Every structure is written in C-alpha cells, then in structure tokens.
Image (tube, helix red, strand yellow):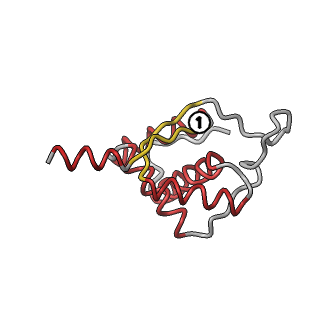
Amino acid sequence: MIKERVNDMAKKRLFSSYLSEELYELVYFLMEREEINKVTFVKRAIRYYMAGDRKLDSRVLITKRNDPDYIERKALFSVHLEEDQKMQLKEVALEKKCKPSQVFFQVILEYCAVLISIDDSGLEIEQ
C-alpha cells in the first residue's frame, strides 16, 4: 500500500504557474464550494479543456506588460500533475506557439467559467 503511494507520487510532477489574483481566489472558492482538492480541480479542468476546442484567448497570449490588455499574473499556483497532463499542456503550447503556463491559465479560466455557468451561487460580480 505504501509502496503504491510512493510510486503514484513519483509519477506526478510539481507544476507551477502564475494566475491573476482574481482567478486564484476564484479557484479556491470553487474548490471549497465543489468540495474537491486542488489536484482533482486541475485534473478536471485539463480534461475539460482537452475535450473542447483548445482555443486560447488573445489576451492570455500577451506578454508585454505595458500592453493595456495584458493580464497581470501575480499569484503563484502550484499543483502536482500527472506526467500525461503536463505533456498535454506542452503539446497545446507547441501547437499554439506559447508557453505551457499560458495554456494552464486558459485551462483554469475556462473551467472556472463552466462551474460558474452551472451554479453561480455565492458569487458577487463586480465591474
């Protein structure tokens, strides 16, 4: 039993990416509301994104901080990913000519939007 757990952990790699502070807070709110942990949340998010059209919002691709549409990402988000999940992010990044962290941002953003569209309870939208 312990040996299996060690093998499972060895198959997972730590992945870190920066999210906007608002998205970071939303992820933690939704994890609590949905009663799931971070690994499960991210696993479902990647699965949802990979089954969809795999589009990236043009604003997610902006890297110049002086661009008015640049999305500021200051909140570090780390999670253990299975190797195949990490490879999926890398494959999309190669295809879209961007970084895996930009793909990850889109993955998390889309999944949060889906969860909110299903149930927006507990949220207040500020403009």
Q: Is residue 113 above or below residue 30?
A: below
Q: How many numbered marks does the figure carry?
A: 1
- Residue 98 vs residue 66: left or right? left
- Residue 54 vs residue 69: left or right? left
How far across and how far down the image is residue 19, in percent? 60, 38
How far across and how far down the image is residue 101, in percent? 62, 45
Q: Could you tell me the amino acid type at mark 1?
A: Glu
Residue 124 vs residue 63, the one in the foreground: 63
Residue visible at 53% across and 38% down? 16
How far across and how far down the image is residue 12, in percent? 39, 47
Residue 92 vs residue 69, the one in the foreground: 92
- Residue 4 vs residue 33: left or right? left
Residue 124 vs residue 35, the one in the foreground: 35
How far across and how far down the image is residue 8, in percent? 29, 49
Residue visible at 72% across and 39% down? 71
* Mark 1, secondary structure of its residue: helix
Q: Is residue 96 above or below residue 34?
A: below
Residue visible at 77% across and 54% down? 58
Residue visible at 16% across and 43% down? 2
Residue 117 vs residue 5, the one in the foreground: 5
Count residues near mark 1 (Cα–Cα under 10 Å), then give few for <14, some for 14-19, many for 20+: few
Residue that mark 1 sits on: 22
- State the quadrant of the C terminus: top right
